[in-house]
Image: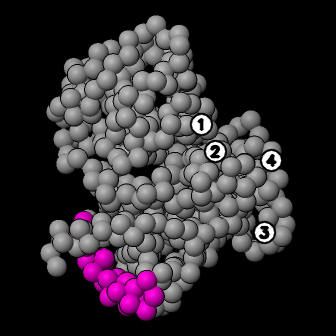
Amino acid sequence: MNAAETIHWLTSLRNRGSSLGLARMEQLAARLHHPERAIPCIHIAGTNGKGSTSAMIEAIQRAEGRKTGLYTSPHLIEIGERIQINRTPTPELDIVAGVEELRPHYEALLAANPDSAPTFFELMTVLAWREFQKQKVDIIILETGMGGRLDATNLCRPEVTVITSIGFDHQEYLGNTLELIAGEKAGIIKSGVPCVLSRLPLQAERVMVEKAKQVGAPVYFVRDRFGENLPLTNLPGEHQRWNAGAAWLACELATRFPIHAASAQSALQNVEWAGRWQKLPLLDGRTLIVDGSHNEEGIRMTESLLAKLNQPTVIVGALGLDRAQALLQAVSKYAGEIILVQPHHERACSVEELSKLVPPPFWGKVSQASVATLFPAAQVCTASGETILAIGSLYLAGEILAHYHGKKLVDHSLQDRFR
């Protein structure tokens, strides 16, 4: 197969749907001599903040001269963003080669039992482990896709586990209470492995502590380690300082990989993580901010940043009416103008649905547009206003960033259906 055909085949796996569970991963990993056991890792779960925390851990480890493997999802523009070596995305041709190596194993499992065939995310996870093994990285920073207990990444044997936050999201898979959601994410906690807990609701924290007691895992709290002196980071917002604290503490507890305070401080001041309150200059001198906050907890965390803007023009696009409602309630307090868009995703809310959720009274202008018309060329935005904020979905963030950088429109057929 050529590269396009391989990518098309990988894309087609989404037609089989996605489901949680480790049985398929266990069979595939066994056929491949357990690549998940080859390299030490730090495992991160949480409703929000796990991507930023993963990027911070990676920055600290790389600052110590180590070769890092970073696995996150979803990607924003290119699929290779999911699998990074020293923060360099894996080239698409390497992704294609890795997929072709895995395909015979997929076909064998499918022939033996259709229910044993790996999902898109499971293949990507195994591909990441194998790529990290080939590239001889020193340490892997591994972000869960969703949940934890039944997530494909949970085959790993980590040095440290981290829980960044617990809030309402993916209730159809994880449960409709904070306790149930916490119970699923607590599934990454393992016997004898230190577990870092960041800022969690009390009921969720209790679940984590109880799980740790059950399996015999020592628990470490960011608040106890840092108190009021959370580490500083270049990523804006108090929540990012909590993420920085979780990252620093996790690195301290990974004792096989010692760190130094000065290099950790420097690393946290130079973290790169796209789509999280990311400020970008437009050609005409105005400022574009792109943020992927998409659920109630994430929106609550970024609201203090939104409040500091002077009546910005806010571009809103969301996946799911519940998410959209919480987002528009927050945005309407501060926006001078709201522009509703429909992200290029099968689960995106239509602009008509979004318009019904703008809460009264909102005295500013509400209009509708497409991402393509708002961003017709690289670093160009046709929306009015000195500051323009685009918020509501990582998929919207990826779509806008593709237009901003003048790149090919992100292919959302290569995304997971869970998010």
Q: Position of residue 162 (x, y in %)?
A: 65, 58
Q: Is residue 115 above or below residue 351?
A: below
SS for dot 1: helix
Q: Secondary structure at mark 4?
A: helix
**Badge number at residue 168:** 2
For label 1, count other residues whose C-alpha is less than 10 Å away and answer few (under 14), some (14-19) or many (20+): some
The majority secondary structure of the magenta stretch comes to helix
Label ID, residue 296: 1
Q: Which numbered disc, 1 or 4, marks the residue that appears first in the sequence?
A: 4
* CA distance separating discs 1 and 4: 17 Å
What's the residue type where badge 3 is placed?
Ala
Q: Single out the mark in the foreground, 2 or 3.
A: 2
- Counting from the top left corner in percent of width and height, residue 360 is at 53, 13
Q: Is residue 294 left or right of residue 390?
A: right
Q: Nearer the viewer, residue 350 or 405?
A: 350
Q: Nearer the viewer, mark 4 or mark 3?
A: 4
* Residue to which mark 3 is pinned: 217
- In magenta segment, residue 113: yes
Q: How far from the left and from the top, in percent, is residue 349?
A: 41, 37
Mark 1 and mark 2: span between their CA atoms? Answer: 7 Å
Task: Name the residue at 36% across, 30% down.
Answer: 351
Q: Amino acid at mark 4?
A: Gln
Q: Which residue is mark 4?
A: 203
Task: Please state the extent of the stretch shown in magenta in the rendering.
Answer: 92-114
Q: CA distance from mark 2 to mark 3?
A: 25 Å
